[in-house]
């Protein structure tokens, strides 16, 4: 699994291990821009991260990390440890029934919202190989009926490998259908970087070390919202979450919007 080299957080070394000793931490209601958070040589963030502070980092060093998330179906998520590898494991098969057609498995950060942000995360897809084999990242999440998500899948079409908006109706793709999808592989970790710029509506999704986004869209319907992780209906593992933002605010409404 790739290690993120976060100079602003790791105190003693230039580049931390896959799982740094820092537990999950959210810094809420910050309004001051900080120093550059990414190390200049880090391939995961070089040339992409603005001069924003890290407002949340999660390395899943223990089961208590799960308490920071609201789940659509908590029974289908568990803490993952394999040697020095730690993460949040989605078993698949969630029983959640969304109000509109959209992903069924969501692990949503409970306590804070962002507008503009950069998200870095490592993902491993553990399901069977088929055209819509996916994992999803959620953002601008205001309620189960209002949010964005990016669906990263093997074969693109209007319903897969795209950026979607759920707005009191079944999900709608807001990006052009891509020319090609991505290859999850078997037992392979991939790094995903997502950028959101609310004023211009920009959404960009980067895959591994690629310098051009694999998906991009323009949409201004939602601004503040929470960030989440999951899948439409598959399984996988989430690790090494880092969120950078110029400001955050406490989450509005229910900390668990899924009604449990």
Image: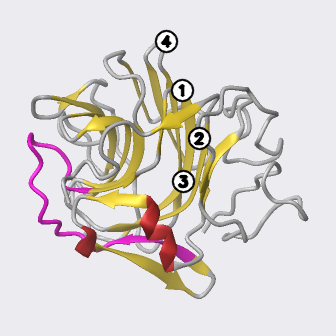
Q: Which residues are magenta?
A: 86-105
Please give the residue where the numbered disc 2 appears in the rendered image.
28
Label 4, secondary structure: give it: loop
Q: Earlier in the sequence, mark 1 or mark 2?
A: 2
First in sequence, mark 4 or 2: give its number. Answer: 2
Residue at the (77%, 41%) spot, across then down: 37
Residues at marks 1 and 4 touching, judged by CB atoms closer than 8 Å: yes
- The CA distance from mark 2 to mark 3 is 20 Å
Q: Position of residue 161 (x, y in %)?
A: 30, 41
Q: CA distance from mark 3 to mark 1?
A: 17 Å
Is residue 219 found left or right of 210 in the rendered image? left
Q: Comparing marks 4 and 2, which lies closer to the viewer?
A: 2
Q: Earlier in the sequence, mark 3 or mark 1?
A: 1
Query: Looking at this view, is 238 or 67 the one in front?
Result: 67
Q: Is residue 251 left or right of residue 85?
A: left
- Distance between the Cα atoms at labels 1 and 4? 9 Å
The residue tagged 4 is 199
Disc 1 to disc 2, how far (Cα)? 14 Å
**How far apart are the two marked residues, 4 and 3, measured between alpha carbons?**
24 Å
Q: Characterize the local packing of mark 1: few (<14), some (14-19) or many (20 or more) Cα atoms within 10 angstroms.
A: many
Secondary structure beneath label 1: loop
């Amino acid at each position: 699994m790739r290690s993120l080299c976060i100079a602003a957080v790791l105190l003693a070394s230039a580049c931390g291990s896959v799982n740094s000793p820092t537990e999950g931490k959210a810094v809420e209601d910050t309004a001051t821009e900080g120093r550059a958070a990414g190390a200049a040589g880090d391939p995961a963030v070089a040339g992409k991260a603005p001069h924003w502070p890290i407002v949340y980092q999660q390395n899943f060093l223990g089961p208590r990390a799960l308490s920071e998330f609201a789940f659509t179906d908590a029974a289908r998520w568990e803490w993952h440890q394999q040697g020095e590898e730690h993460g949040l494991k989605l078993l698949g098969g969630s029983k959640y029934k969304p109000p509109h057609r959209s992903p069924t498995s969501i692990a949503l950060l409970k306590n804070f919202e962002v507008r503009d942000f950069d998200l870095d995360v490592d993902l491993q897809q553990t399901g069977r190989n088929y055209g819509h084999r996916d994992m999803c990242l959620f953002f601008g999440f205001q309620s189960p009926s209002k949010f964005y998500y990016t669906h990263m899948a093997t074969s693109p079409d209007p319903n897969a490998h795209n950026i979607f908006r759920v707005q009191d109706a079944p999900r709608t793709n807001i990006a052009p259908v891509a020319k090609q999808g991505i290859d999850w592989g078997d037992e392979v970790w991939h790094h995903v970087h997502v950028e959101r710029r609310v004023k211009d509506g920009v959404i960009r999704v980067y895959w591994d070390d690629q310098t051009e986004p694999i998906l991009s869209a323009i949409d201004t319907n939602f601004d503040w919202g929470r960030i989440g992780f999951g899948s439409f209906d598959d399984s996988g593992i989430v690790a090494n979450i880092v969120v950078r933002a110029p400001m955050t605010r406490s989450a509005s409404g229910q900390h668990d919007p899924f009604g449990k």
